Image (spheres, grey):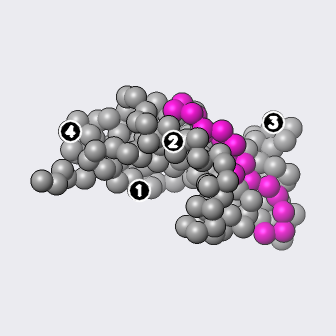
Amino acid sequence: MEVTKKGRSFMKMATGFKFRLFLLRDLPMGFLSGMKIKDITPDKCQVTIPYKYLTKNPFKSMYFACLTMAAEMSTGALGVAATFGQKPSVAMLVQGVEGEFSKKAVGLITFTCEEGSHVFQAVERTLESGEGEKATCLTIGTDEAGDEVARFKFTWSFKARKKSG
């Protein structure tokens, strides 16, 4: 499936100042946490989140909910890129999440999801059939040394809305 012109526009916007404004308006905890989309292509998305006062827990590491938020963004941004500008529009929703934590998360944590093709294929299938489709995306969080700190699987549901007219 090709990325729509609007989808490419979203990917360009996602790494810039406008996305920070979106976070401030629609996802304030993402903004306050310092979460950022570092890179996004049709194949992969990288999201960073820093260890700081607002993301810490009492155990001197990053709070699991902050890690989960950044992990979700690394998979969900691919879904937004795939659905942005589609006719008919496509609804997306998280249907499941699994997480594993392997090391204390301190410093700058980067979540990388390389499951873009699964997401775009699910969106293409729902546009063709009108039926709901699912895509399960693995994302792996690493610290600045490249050591894995967590991994998550998010299952996204996509459903093309009925054509009006």
The image shows residue 145 at horizontal and vertical percentages of 86, 38
Which tag, 4 or 3, sits closer to the chain's start? 4
Which residue in the protein does label 3 denote?
146
Asked if residue 66 shows in the view, the reply is: yes
Which residue in the protein does label 1 denote?
93
Left or right: 16 in relation to 83: right
> Would you identify the image quadrant in which residue 31 lies?
bottom right
Q: Secondary structure at mark 2?
A: helix
Of the residues shown, which amino acid type is indicated by label 4? Answer: Ser
What's the CA distance linking mark 2 and mark 3?
30 Å
Which residue in the protein does label 2 denote?
9
Q: Secondary structure at mark 3?
A: loop
What's the CA distance linking mark 1 and mark 3?
30 Å
Viewer-nearest of discs 1 and 2 = 2
The image shows residue 34 at horizontal and vertical percentages of 74, 59
Stretch in magenta: 36-54
Q: Is there CB contact under 8 Å for labels 4 and 3?
A: no
The image shows residue 98 at horizontal and vertical percentages of 55, 51
Q: Secondary structure at mark 4?
A: helix
What's the CA distance linking mark 4 and mark 3?
41 Å
What's the CA distance linking mark 2 and mark 4?
26 Å
| Residue at (58, 47) in percent of width and height | 13
Viewer-nearest of discs 2 and 3 = 2
